[in-house]
Image: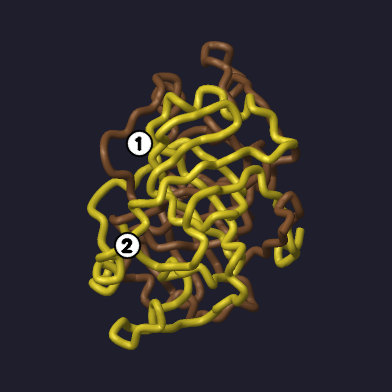
Chain colours: A brown, B yellow
Amino acid sequence: MNYTKTLEVKPIAVIKNNRTAAIDDNWSHVESIIELQQDVPESCLDGIEEFSHLEIIYYFHKSTKTFIGSEHPRENPAFPKVGIFAQRKKDRPNHIGATIVELAGRQGRTLTVKNLDALDGTPVLDIKPVFREFLPRGEIRQPEWSRILMKNYW
Amino acid sequence: MNYTKTLEVKPIAVIKNNRTAAIDDNWSHVESIIELQQDVPESCLDGIEEFSHLEIIYYFHKSTKTFIGSEHPRENPAFPKVGIFAQRKKDRPNHIGATIVELAGRQGRTLTVKNLDALDGTPVLDIKPVFREFLPRGEIRQPEWSRILMKNYW
């Protein structure tokens, strides 16, 4: 089978919040609602309240370009040039974002979540519960540029 | 814009390992190679060695069905019925998997990784570096069934 072929995915929910412009930083203050699409049954969320954290897989719908190769994160020459798969920027192949959020509540077909760094109207491709067993084991090592980049992110 | 529409994604890499059959457990012993597709430049991996952990977003290419609704995880009646978005099973809308792995090494266009729970031949949609700042803050709460289910997973 040839997996250079294109695959199709379909949004299962949409994100609603007050962040309408693409701003890099200060995401902690944004609370989001995730609302299931009309054709997705409410029962898909059953039992989700028992998890404190979820991973939201979403689509960077406002990204109009795809960067492929190596460049300075945030186009900041103070940062080293690194490959697109060594950074988390939105203008990436497939435009897929993934963020672990805190589940604040469920109301029927909607979830209220904190720490979701996605714009209003963002299509959601998947929602996964966070299991402790899937979190990294051992020490996490990351370059200095990534620490500086994240300084005001939350 | 109507995001009930279908979106297109394209594999950027493929997973190679010795796990060819869909078995639920004992993933710790599987070491995988992730090889970039021919049309993806090697420079996309520049600097990735500075990260100890990566998140691999992949496509469950061997899953032939999509479950939507609420059911017993692993079809085990000892577990409560929970919604598809409250579990991590492969037969889910969009068939997207996401796993944090340990980066063991890079050799040009390929990465060697540990703790990747995906079958040989799995198409990869994205590779993201793990930043400590994106990991969950605060205590992680999860139901008892998920702890039991994970007992022999790694």
- Residue at 72% of width from left, 61% of height from top? A8
User: A97 or B138, which is in the foreground?
Assistant: A97
Chain letter behind tag 1? B
Q: Alpha-carbon neighbours of circle 2 within 10 Å: few (<14), some, or many (≥20)? A: some
- Can you tell which of label 2 and label 1 is closer to the viewer? 2
Q: Quadrant of residue B60?
A: bottom right
| Quarter of the picture holding the N terminus of chain B | bottom right
Rendered image: mark on residue B132: 1
Give amino acid for label 1. Answer: Arg
Rendered image: mark on residue B153: 2
Q: Is residue A59 left or right of residue B90?
A: right
Considering only vertical position in the picture, is A49 above or below B114? below
x, y percentage for residue B143?
A: 27, 70
CA gap between label 2 and label 1 equals 24 Å
Q: Is residue B73 left or right of residue B36?
A: left
- Residue at 63% of width from left, 23% of height from top? A70
x, y percentage for residue B50?
A: 43, 24
